[in-house]
Image (cartoon, rainbow, N blue to C red):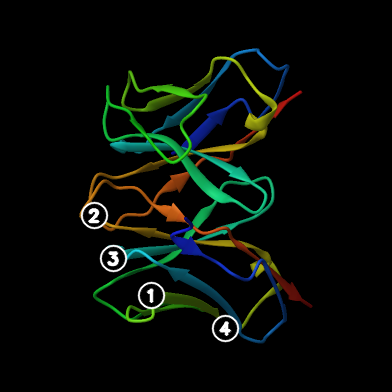
Amino acid sequence: DQQVKQNSPSLSVQEGRISILNCDYTNSMFDYFLWYKKYPAEGPTFLISISSIKDKNEDGRFTVFLNKSAKHLSLHIVPSQPGDSAVYFCAASATSGTYKYIFGTGTRLKVLA
Amino acid sequence: NAGVTQTPKFRVLKTGQSMTLLCAQDMNHEYMYWYRQDPGMGLRLIHYSVGEGTTAKGEVPDGYNVSRLKKQNFLLGLESAAPSQTSVYFCASQQDRVWQEQYFGPGTRLTVT
């Protein structure tokens, strides 16, 4: 049973436009969420996080939105740049338990120049 | 700081052979993790450790063993490799506080023939 789902395997966006990556989760105990970016042949790198006490967190061009009632989070990248082309993973954790994260299957973003 | 390092970067094994993957971190993190990444499956947790001398099973522990004799090192062993263990393996570490991100190593690409 996939507790964290990224239903879009891939996404193509024109340079300068907005990229929106989506993530859904099923476990209502999840209260902390992360987004990671992964380039080929490298390990994932942390991008941005959000806790369940917030509904939005911004860091430069990256904003994560959390809709707890819908169990949905999204990552917005504005403006998108060719260097943003990578695989993006969302991850969720229930911090009341052990410090484990459940990862989604990833979305491959391609930003077209 | 080197962060999280993994040895080796690549390895080819024959079915039935054994090997050990080494993960080292220099951030004094308490928690360490081993994941495998397969196409369309995202990152799946194999085993993890919440401190020196402790280990616990993740989602997909079968066929693997781990040891954490020193805080900075986390070893992943395959006693009798199978083709189903062909994957990219990532190690990660994390501070022992809530709402913390995980830091990943560069990965080990393992092929079992």
The chain that hosts pointer 2 is B
Q: Mark 4 belongs to which amino acid?
A: Val
Q: Give the foreground label among 3 and 4.
A: 3
The answer for which chain carries disc 3 is A
Q: Residues within 10 Å of mark 4 (few under 14, many from 20)?
A: some
The answer to whether mark 1 and mark 4 are in CB contact below 8 A is no
Q: Is residue A33 above or below residue B16?
A: below
Q: Are marks 2 and 4 in contact (CB under 8 Å)?
A: no
- For label 1, the residue is A71
- Which mark, by number, is residue A31? 3
Figure quadrant of residue A93: bottom left
- The Cα atoms of the two marked residues, 2 and 4, are separated by 29 Å
User: What residue type is disc 3 on?
Assistant: Asp
Q: Nearer the viewer, mark 2 or mark 3?
A: 3
Q: Which residue is denoted by mark 2 in the rendering?
A: B98
Q: Secondary structure at mark 2?
A: loop
Three-letter residue code for mark 1 = Lys
Residue B36 placement (x, y as % from top left)? 55, 40
Give me the C-alpha separation between circle 1 and circle 4. Answer: 23 Å
Give how far apart the Cα atoms at labels 2 and 1 are.
21 Å
> Label 4 belongs to which residue?
A78
Q: Amino acid at mark 2?
A: Val
- Mark in front: 2 vs 1: 1
Q: Are marks 2 and 1 on the same chain?
A: no
Front label number (1 vs 4) = 1
> Percent from the top left, x then y, of residue A5?
51, 65
Q: Residue at x 46, y 62 (%)?
A: A4
CA gap, disc 1 to disc 3?
A: 10 Å
Give the residue at x 29% y 45%. Answer: B95
Q: Are marks 1 and 3 on the same chain?
A: yes
